[in-house]
Image (cartoon, rainbow, N blue to C red):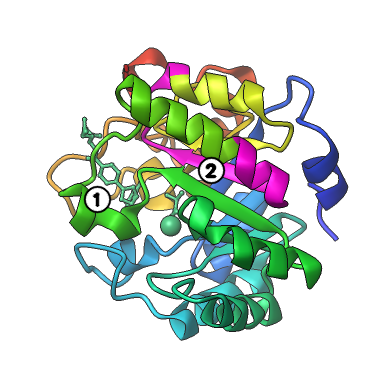
Amino acid sequence: MSNVTLTRLQTQKPAGDKIVMLTAYEATLARAACNAGVEMLLVGDSLGMVVQGNDSTLPVTVDEMAYHTACVKRGNLGAFLLSDLPFMAAASVDSGLAASAKLMRAGAQMVKIEGGLSLIPLLQRLAQNGVPVCVHMGLTPQWVNLFGGYKVQGRGAEQAQRLIDDAKALEQAGAAMLLLECVPAALAAQITKAVQIPVIGIGAGAATDGQVLVIHDLLGLTLRSRPPKFVKNFMAGRDSIEAAIAAYVQAVKSGEFPGQEHEFSA
Ligand SMILES: Nc1nc(=O)c2c([nH]1)NC[C@@H]1CN(c3ccc(C(=O)N[C@@H](CCC(=O)O)C(=O)O)cc3)CN21
Ligand SMILES: CC(C)C(=O)C(=O)O
Ligand SMILES: [Mg+2]
């Protein structure tokens, strides 16, 4: 299996030991990430932006996710592999099950799905069939057209309480992990305390059980004029991709990344 075992993921939060996750879309960089100490590889639908050059993740298909998952699987050396269900794949329980089956057959060990309470029926069916699920909450990029941009979520008491309640209910329904994107750091800390399952953060402050970044961001590569606030270029001052990824691993493990300059306030 993997260095990060499902047992560890499901039974306990890591004791002071932050989980380090990084996106991967192909074999060679997946191997570099493993060599640098990354514990979990995410085949993110962000590939629609950084690999395909779209301005959102919406064009990505299940077959494309399965193709990149298979590529990453071949380069993987013991990291825990999870893949995103792309836009609309979870629109019905049946389509969510079919898409998850494709990703798991391609090599994923867990699927990540954007959403909230409405995912519970799908979540339960997946768990009953041996598929661990990570629920991606907060800024869910597949909702960009409803949000009106990539904006911080969970600001204001009502929105914050709803995220806390949803996180607890999703844990209760069988979610194996949560991912919080672009929420105030204090809210992410509250949610992380409120559940037993691991919580991974991106733009969610330092208190979550682990961190994730898009590999291109870590390497200082961007198609946009300005990278998101939560991004740090770990390539700066280093002379290899592997050294940059290793610096990210080290910075997450030591608690040095993310810093206050990378987080959002309520
Ligand atoms: N390269 C890359 N990195 C990512 O982290 C990423 C992708 N692509 N594609 C899919 C989504 C889109 N993401 C994004 C994109 C932009 C912001 C952004 O610019 N956010 C503003 C916050 C605005 C506010 O204050 O509400 C920022 O200043 O960081 C955030 C997440 C995260 N994901
Ligand atoms: C940014 C992470 C969390 C993601 O969902 C992706 O890369 O698609
Ligand atoms: Mg994604």
Name which residue lies at 74% across and 32% down.
Answer: 196
Dots 1 and 2: beta carbons under 8 Å?
no
The residue where tag 1 is placed is: 222
- Left-right relation of 104 to 180: right
Magenta segment includes 146: no
Q: What stretch is highlighted in magenta?
A: 168-186
Mark-to-mark CA distance, 1 and 2:
23 Å
User: Could you tell me residue 146's position as x and y percent?
Assistant: 21, 54
Depth check: 237 or 48 in front?
A: 48
Please state which amino acid type lies under the numbered disc 1: Thr
Label 2 C-beta lies within 8 Å of the nearest ligand 2 atom: yes
The 10 Å Cα crowd at callout 2, few under 14, some 14 to 19, many 20 or more, is many
User: Could you tell me residue 22's position as x and y percent?
Assistant: 54, 48
Q: Does residue 68 appear in this view?
A: yes
Depth check: 172 or 249 in front?
A: 172
Label 1 C-beta lies within 8 Å of the nearest ligand 1 atom: yes
